[in-house]
Amino acid sequence: MQIAIHTGAHFTDEERLIKCLMRNAEVFSQHGIAVPGPGRYRTLLKNTMSALKDAPPAPDARDVLLDAILDDAQADRMILSNTNLFGAPRAAIRRGMIYPTAGTRMANICQLFPHDQVEMFIGIRNPASFLPELFKRSPRQTFDHFTDGVDPRDIFWSELLLRIRSEAPNVSITVWCNEDTPLIWGQLIREIAGLDPVANIIGSFDLLAEIMSDEGMKRFQDYLDTHDGISEMQIRRIVAAFLDKFALEDELEEELDLPDWDEALVDELTDIYDEDVFTIQRIPGVTVIEP
């Protein structure tokens, strides 16, 4: 069985992604793809992962889990999603590492499903906005305490992915930047579902509607309705053109709430993030989805 596990930086688009997957569940099932509701597996998987800290999985652990999650349904591919897979927000940064338990947890998942094809899908986010959001939800009193004294310039997503590749080398990893999500939403859903790039899905442009004016969305949809056979790459160029004219600027801007961070530091962190994405693209076994 193929097991697609979606996680991502906290405060990304997980809830909307789950809703989109669930909206397509009936169509997906015709292709042997199961999209169980999160209530079926999150607590179960959390308790199972906790038990693996003390002992390896029982021989029948996989079958017991699948029976509980799928409820006797047959599937060739199962999609699971949990932003907290690698830990709650308060534990997301330790000693300058993003999700320090991620490698171990992915290795444990591979132990649970030793003969299955495990795939991981993770959205990442610019540390210039990601770290402040985490800090606001942290019990730490100062940002320096929150990062254990590590300079935010030295916190990298590539370090996380290299760690996961080292501890769970058989897991294929697909990565995207949360900032690009509205532009790649349709492809992202198809990739997680393991569908053909041109397969029809419900809600391909759900996120685009949140950052484009109503007039722009109407014109965009009219354009698609009158132009058949447009490739995914062509659609992205068309989206970019419409956004250039009809984007809702207020929806594209993020507010930062760290009084000690000036614009120069935010720009520097953004440049470092861009370079880190280039590093991630060169990691074997990692695929980066880009606009």
Image (spheres, rainbow, N blue to C red):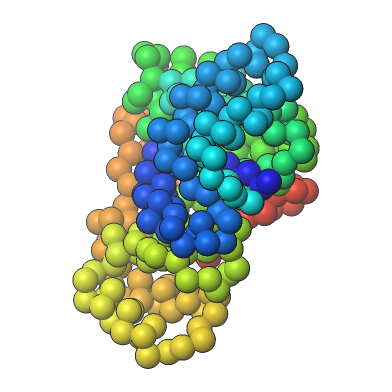
Which residue appears farthest toward the top when viewing the image?
54
* 202 displayed left or right of 158: left
- Residue 101, located in which quarter of the rendered image? top right
Residue name at image x 29 percent, y 60 percent: 210
Q: Nearer the viewer, residue 224 or 177?
A: 224
- Residue 132, located in which quarter of the rendered image? top left
Counting from the top left corner in percent of width and height, residue 245 is at 31, 76
**Residue 149 seen in render:** no
- Residue 246, located in which quarter of the rendered image? bottom left
Q: Nearer the viewer, residue 116 or 161?
A: 116
In the image, residue 228 above or below residue 278: below
* 70 displayed left or right of 12: right
**Residue 28 seen in render:** yes
In the image, residue 269 above or below residue 220: above
Residue name at image x 37 percent, y 90 percent: 226
Count how many numbered circles sit on residues in the image: 0
Residue name at image x 38 percent, y 56 percent: 23
Q: Nearer the viewer, residue 102 or 46?
A: 46
Counting from the top left corner in percent of width and height, residue 261 is at 39, 33
Residue name at image x 50 percent, y 24 percent: 44
Counting from the top left corner in percent of width and height, residue 64 is at 61, 27
Which residue appears farthest toward the left when viewing the image?
214
Counting from the top left corner in percent of width and height, residue 100 is at 61, 23
In the image, residue 99 above or below residue 274: above
* 272 displayed left or right of 82: right
